[in-house]
Structure formats: C-alpha cells, structure tokens
Amino acid sequence: RKEVEQDPGPFNVPEGATVAFNCTYSNSASQSFFWYRQDCRKEPKLLMSVYSSGNEDGRFTAQLNRASQYISLLIRDSKLSDSATYLCVVGLNDYKLSFGAGTTVTVRA
Amino acid sequence: GAVVSQHPSWVICKSGTSVKIECRSLDFQATTMFWYRQFPKQSLMLMATSNEGSKATYEQGVEKDKFLINHASLTLSTLTVTSAHPEDSSFYICSAPAGGVYNEQFFGPGTRLTVL
C-alpha cells in the first residue's frame, strides 16, 4: 500500500467553480501535513500546511482528519492560474516527507 | 525567503557517463538535505538523506554505489549518477529543511536528466 494516496483526477472545472479532493495516508504516526503545488516540469512549491483544526488561506481550505487519516483541499472561485498538480505530502518526525502522486486540476475559461 | 538552487537545470548525456548535480542552500545553512527522483506522472520518491560531515542515508532500493552523495559543506550537497543508463532519466530534486517550521522544506528547481 502506498504511504500517501490521491485521486489523480484530472478535475476539469470552469472558472469560478469550487473543486475539492482528498488524500489518505497510511502511517498513523505522521505528524505534519502539507499541500504542495507542482506545475509541469517544475519543482513543488508549498501551498499550505494543514493543521488539525483545519485552516484557510484565501480561496484555499485544508482539513485534516486524523481518525480517518485523510486530508482534504478545497479551492473556491477557481482561477485559470490554479491549474496545476496538487501534491499531498505527509511527514514523520525526522524531516522525511512522503508524497502522493498528485491530483491534476485544470481550470477552463 | 530561503532559496535552494540546483545546477545544472537540465543535462543530456550518453549512456555510461557520470553526471554530477549540485544542490546549494543560498542564504541558510543546511546540515541535512534530501534528494528525490520523480518519473513522469509519478510522485516524488525520496532517494537519500544527505548529511553534512557524514555518510548519506539511502532509502531501500536505492544503490549507494550508483548514486554517490557528498555533503561537503553546510551549503552544498552533490549527487553523482555514475555510469548513467537510460532508465536513470528522470527529474532529480533536492530539498533542505526550513528550520523553524517543522518538516517544511525548500525545494530546488530540479535537474532534468536525459540519458541517451
């Protein structure tokens, strides 16, 4: 079983729509959680950390459910520039990160 | 914010040659750096943890004699792909911990290696 599993998508949505997707992780000892964004042929860039209480950053909302071991990301009012692959990333306590394969989002005009 | 650079950004080489990739932390010191590899449409896979002043720690299945890692200073780690073959063609990315924020890391821009 993969450590981090994501729905690969693609999610193809019109501008202004809301899109949401999840990922699940297998190691219950995981301590840190992130969403990264990766554009084609580029390095991942941190979108937001995910906290137990859930957190919001502008149009992006992340939720963490430790009991069910899943993390979600919701994007409101989608922009064309939100088109990217979103990586679910989970960390243990030694700085090692486990990456999901990514969920592809395409926002169309 | 902190920046991690990689050099070269892309490289094409013949099968059998060795390729060195550099990862530098530009405005901070990194006693630990990480090397990842990403094949098309796949996730980043951690290859090894590079430790300044000591041997690298390799993940299961990664050949340490093929992927030589040297963390020569607090700002530089190098990955050498020895006797590269076409199956080594991939996107190699390094990262360094951000320090203050637990597990947050800064990623280099990546090196795209193509072995002919």
Image (tube, coloured by chain):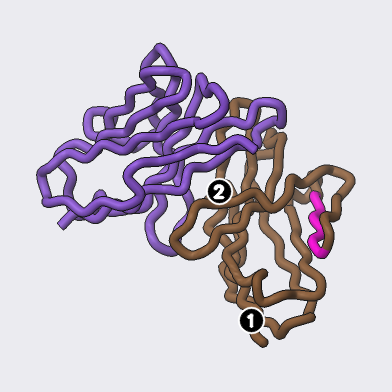
Chain colours: A brown, B purple
> Pointer 2 indicates a residue of which chain?
A
> Pointer 1 indicates a residue of which chain?
A
Mark 2: secondary structure: strand
Mark 1: secondary structure: strand
Q: Which residue is mark 1?
A: A12
Quarter holding the C terminus of chain A is: bottom right
Q: Position of residue B107 (x, y in %)?
A: 53, 42
Residue at 65% from the left image edge and 26% from the top image edge? B99
Figure quadrant of residue A106? bottom right
Furthest-front residue in this view: B27
Q: Position of residue A20 (x, y in %)?
A: 75, 69
Residue at 50% from the left image edge and 24% from the top image edge? B32
Residue type indicated by callout 2: Phe
Please rate how many residues cluster around mark 2, counting C-alpha atoms within 10 Å: few if below 14, some from 14 to 19, many from 20.
many
Residue stretch rendered in magenta on the structure: A59-64
Q: Is residue B99 left or right of residue B5?
A: right
Q: Is residue B36 left or right of residue A93?
A: left
Q: Is residue B82 left or right of residue B29?
A: left
Q: Position of residue B105 (x, y in %)?
A: 60, 37
Q: Which mark is residue A99?
A: 2
